[in-house]
Image (cartoon, rainbow, N blue to C red):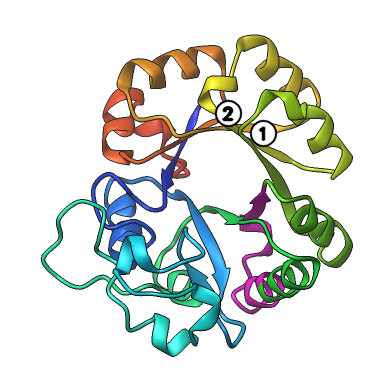
Amino acid sequence: MTLIYGHRGAKGEAPENTLTSFQQCLQHGVSRCELDLHLSRDGELMVIHDPTLKRTTGRRGKVAQHSAEELAGYDARLGGPGWKQPCPIPRLSELFENCAFEHWQLEVKSASRDRAARTVLAIKALAERHQLLDRITVTSSSREVLRALKRLAPAISRGLVAEYAWLDPLKVARHYGCDLLALKWTLCTPERLAKAQQQGLHVSVWTVNEPALMRRLADFGADSLITDFPGVAVATLGTSRTGVKR
């Protein structure tokens, strides 16, 4: 069964990585999501893809230079589908409180050793507070982040984000004890998929937006697809793929 994950909520349908986008994903019956995290200046986990604010808010500076309160007041509607109401940058805690996802892929971008450690510890503390430790997988392409996860939060499921074949994603995933491989769709061959699954990895393929590609990857046996258009994915693959327990 190939499950569906909403990419940054429903990135193709609503402003990415906003509460509105995640609510849109849930409205399609898709109970699994992928999102991106950066730490604010005062150490809160903020849901935003880029390390800078320009693309989604039009503001200057890096996420890390602003407090959580400041960031939560910035409208993140730019660069995506048109939306009438403001869509602030959410704290991860806000999503945990307001979105009943069955599973979360939390991607942490590249970070220094110190920042990776602080991010991992912040995720661990927040997941414990909301009793979600068994419903998250923290993913990254960063060795520093994966190393920090293995050392500081070994009980949290971890996953490798793989974009380039020359890095030998299966070897890297095995080295860091990953449970999940977030694999770019261009790397997803039947042979690599089968080998990863034999290794015990859940293979989540990104970013899959075309119905024909969705069907092909499902036929290959991909464990899950990450898509900007969860509504299209449900229509293409059927409601049984949403991740909702029936």
Work out whether mark 1 precedes mark 2 in sequence or the reverse, and give the earlier one: 1
Residue 1 appears in the picture as rendered:
no
- State the extent of the magenta-drawn residues as a range: 123-140
Residue under the image location 55 percent in, 64 percent down: 37
Q: Quadrant of residue 112?
A: bottom right
Q: Residue at x 34, y 30 (%)?
A: 209
Amino acid carrying mark 2 in the image? Asp
Q: Which residue is at the front of the view, 75 or 19?
A: 75
135 in the magenta segment: yes
Return the residue nearer the eye: 29 or 16. 16
x, y percent for residue 80 = 25, 52
Looking at this view, name the residue that lies furthest to the left.
84
Helix, strand or loop for disc 2: loop
Q: What residue is shown with label 2?
A: 223
Q: Is residue 1 left or right of residue 19?
A: right
Give the number of the disc on residue 119: none
Q: Which quadrant holds the C terminus?
A: top left
Residue 143 x/y as whole percent: 78, 50
What residue appears at the point 77 percent right and 26 percent down from the top-left corner? 168
The residue that mark 1 highlights is: 202
Task: Tell me if residue 128 is in the magenta stretch.
Answer: yes
Mark 1 crowd level (few <14, some 14–19, many ≥20, 10 Å Cα): some
